[in-house]
Amino acid sequence: MADLFSKFDPLIQQREALLATGVTDPFSLVMERVVSPTVAICNGRETILLGTYNYMGMTFDADVIAAGKEALDTFGSGTTGSRVLNGTYQGHKECEEALKEFYAMDHAMVFSTGYQANLGIISTIAGKGDYVILDIDSHASIYDGCKMGDAEIVAFRHNDIEALEKRLKRLPPEAGKLVVLEGVYSMLGDVAPLKEMVRIAKENGAMVLVDEAHSMGFIGEHGRGVAEAQGVIDDVDFIIGTFSKSVGTVGGFCVSNHPKFEIMRLVCRPYVFTASLPPSVVATAATSIRKLMHGSNKRAHLWENSKALHKGLRDLGFTLGTDEPQSAIIAVIMPDLEKGAMMWEALLEEGLYVNLARPPATPAGMTLLRCSLCAEHSSAQVGEILGRFERAGKAVGIIG
Ligand SMILES: Cc1ncc(COP(=O)(O)O)c(C=O)c1O
């Protein structure tokens, strides 16, 4: 009998070799208690959280929590059903109303996760004979949506405007085309040149989907994302987002002005064939989204944090993913996986949690320590974070 697990042998060996060095497993950390959006207890130690994507710090917002508790008491713990059967409650509709207002768009569809939103929308609108043209560094949920949908996949070099144009010009003019972009790419924290890319897509007869998972609530005048900040939101056909980052809970969505968008509720399998979000989750999401509409002070503070951390890390001698801070993600490039894991562990021992990312999830085979800032990080915490990076970086030999 062929062992179906043999394909995982290289990964098992890599993991065993890493753990044999004595380093703590970076992928099985337990948060024993969460004190606030920026502090948790890990291994019995108070730890500053710098890898949670909780950009706007909404997880402990008093109004958000109260809304969730009330919905739990009133509507129960779960819907036990699909959105198209018994799983649409008042709260799901209110959540979709909040999204329509937030984005000033005609239609909003809430999914159980952002992963499912990409899976569902991409696979449903781009089918056999169509083309999906995507940035090679796209999120796994975008690739999986393509695989499920049977469209031809055409990848272009990351953030390369000319490469996108060249690929589009080679495709049959009459074919259905969907250009899929992200506002912020989460590995390096860099922003897409959406202004040029959306124009080129439109000139070449393509529809455009932008995943704004890492920009919602933070980037753009109203926090609608990079497409808003670069003035092209009206030309974007579909925006995908998640509740698991700035909104501070779980869930995903797509908003659109397409006049036929509502038919998606009947044909999109990851929407139809799964249970809807629990009432408490949609209540927290709707409350959080409405509060994010008035979040400009928090946005300004988050930018200050991002700039201060980027400058501080660069001054310490770390190599960063971007020359300037472009988002709330700052990626610190490690020489290799072993050093990256050692640095991750040294930071944890200092009381600082960051995300360790390694190939194949990362571009160009890089090992990264991905830092994501929160609007609730105080300036003093950012100073603390820099001190911990300095001590850990010197101890591990990453900086001199
Ligand atoms: C760009 C992007 N899209 C989609 C998702 C999926 O979001 P969710 O956590 O809601 O499944 C993520 C999450 O990491 C992401 O980074």
Image (cartoon, helix red, strand yellow):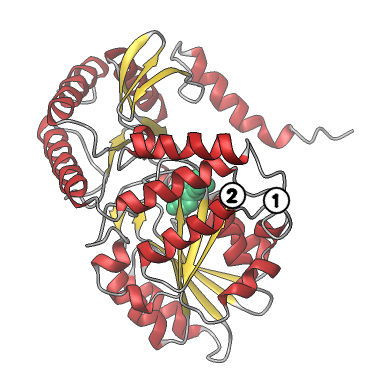
Image quarter of the N terminus: top right
> For this rendering, which residue is in front, 141 or 279?
279
Q: Report the side of 294 relative to 316 (left or right).
A: right
Kind of element beneath mark 1 = loop
Q: Amino acid at mark 1?
A: Thr
Q: Is the residue marked 1 within 8 Å of ligand 1, measured from its CB?
A: no
Q: CB at mark 2 closer than 8 A to ligand 1? A: no
Q: Can residue 366 be seen here?
A: yes
Which residue is most to the right? 1
Residue plotted at (26% across, 61% down): 222
Residue corresponding to mark 2:
112
- Give the structural element (helix, strand or loop) at label 2: loop
State which quadrant residue 395 falls in.
top left
Give the residue at x 63% y 66%.
123
User: Is label 1 in contact with label 2 (beta carbons under 8 Å)?
Assistant: yes
Instruction: Give the answer, above or below, for where 286 lies relative to 3.
Output: below
Query: Across the whole image, how many numbered discs are drawn on residues?
Result: 2
Q: Quadrant of the C terminus?
A: top left
- Image height of 184 relative to 42, above or below: below
Which residue is labeled 1 in the image?
A: 274
Image coordinates for residue 15, horizontal then vertical, percent? 55, 24
The span from disc 1 to disc 2 (Cα, nearest Å) is 8 Å
User: Which kind of residue does numbered mark 2 sit on?
Assistant: Ser
> Few, some or many C-alpha atoms within 10 Å of disc 2 (few <14, some 14-19, many ≥20)?
many
The residue under the point 64% across, 55% down is 88
Measured as percent of width and height from the top left, residue 188 is found at 32, 47
The residue lying furthest to the top in this view is 44
Task: Please identify the quarter of the rendering in which residue 160 is found.
Answer: bottom left
